[in-house]
Image (cartoon, rainbow, N blue to C red):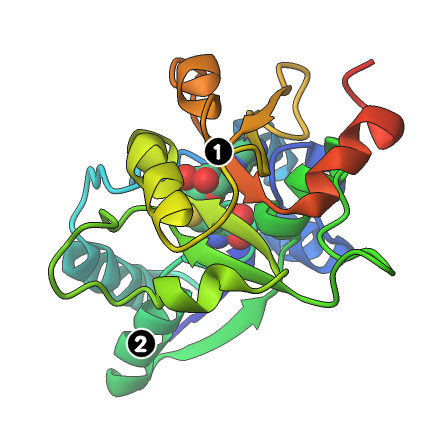
Amino acid sequence: MGKVYLTGAGPGDIELLTLKALKVIKRADVIVYDRLANPEILKEAKDGCEFVYVGKADSHHTLPQDEINELLYQLAQKYETVVRLKGGDPLVFGRGGEEALFLKSKGVKFEFIPGITSAVAVPEYAGIPVTHRGITVSFRVVTGHEAPYKEKSQIPWENFKTDDTIVFLMGLHNLDKITKKLIEIGKPKDFPIAVISKGTTPEEKTVIGTLEDIYEKAKDLPTPALIVVGEVVRLHEQLNWFEK
Ligand code: SAH
């Protein structure tokens, strides 16, 4: 029986792939990959490597999670080295933990290979540090997929009154609701916010605004995109090094 490597592909820029990930990709017998993993990475695989696209992006699953789990299990019966390649880090909203639990329950060996998460690297390419001395001492990474006005929200909105930088992943389609909710809990209407689309790639685009006007400015940006809320967003003006 083979082993499954739950591997982070990094946020987009192929050079942000780790050496450890590259090594296992080069010897993989099969690579199961997502929409968010840069397809250029697949060129590093050996001749004869099988590729399986499971196309999961945001919430639009092409293959349901339990079928992906089962697929990984089946592939581990057939191959020595199975690479499950995911955008960013496999355990940051990547469901890598669920896949690992399933594999473990079936007696299949697995390994996690961390990846550079978009939550930190994408703001960084936009010149926005998620922490900055004198501005904020912590940051949160939150799913933006859950609608903020859902009755039983799992998101502790009241906790966002602090100075923490907040990074919302999967949130572009809820941008309007997220900004309204943040104003509702007491953030100023002119509080800084950024939306960064296709971060770390040649098509990266950052739009800066306030909680009040960002929706109109950024709603039509292409995905993947993430949202950064916090005073650190103001540093973009001076530190924006990549898009220039
Ligand atoms: N495991 C991934 C995140 C998966 S959730 C990671 O660690 O990066 C998918 C969300 O990540 C997208 O909806 C988007 O909000 C964000 N994202 C991933 N790649 C991105 C990119 N290149 N630019 C902007 N946002 C990105």
Label 2 packing within 10 angstroms: few (<14), some (14-19), many (20+): many
For image coordinates 26% across by 67% down, the residue present is 154
For image coordinates 70% across by 55% down, the residue present is 23
Classify residue 68 as left or right of residue 46: left
User: Which label was assigned to residue 211?
Assistant: 1
Q: Can you name the residue that lies furthest to the left here?
A: 151
Q: Amino acid at mark 2?
A: Leu
Residue 51 visible from this viewpoint: no
Q: Quadrant of residue 195?
A: top right
Viewport quadrant of the C terminus: top right
Q: Quadrant of residue 20?
A: bottom right
Ligand 1 has an atom within 8 Å of the beta carbon of the residue at disc 1: no
Ligand 1 has an atom within 8 Å of the beta carbon of the residue at disc 2: no
SS assignment at label 2: helix
Say which residue label 2 marks.
Answer: 103
For image coordinates 71% across by 52% down, the residue present is 130
**Residue 136, image x and y in percent?**
74, 60
Q: Quadrant of residue 58?
A: top left
Mark closest to the chain's N terminus, 2 or 1: 2
Q: Amino acid at mark 1?
A: Leu
Label 1 packing within 10 angstroms: few (<14), some (14-19), many (20+): many
The residues tagged by marks 2 and 1 sit, at their Cα atoms, a distance apart of: 43 Å
Classify residue 225 as left or right of residue 15: left
SS assignment at label 1: loop
**Above/below status of 160 relative to 244:** below
Viewport quadrant of the N terminus: bottom left
The residue lying toward the viewer, choosing from 76 and 111, is: 111
User: Which label was assigned to residue 41?
Assistant: none
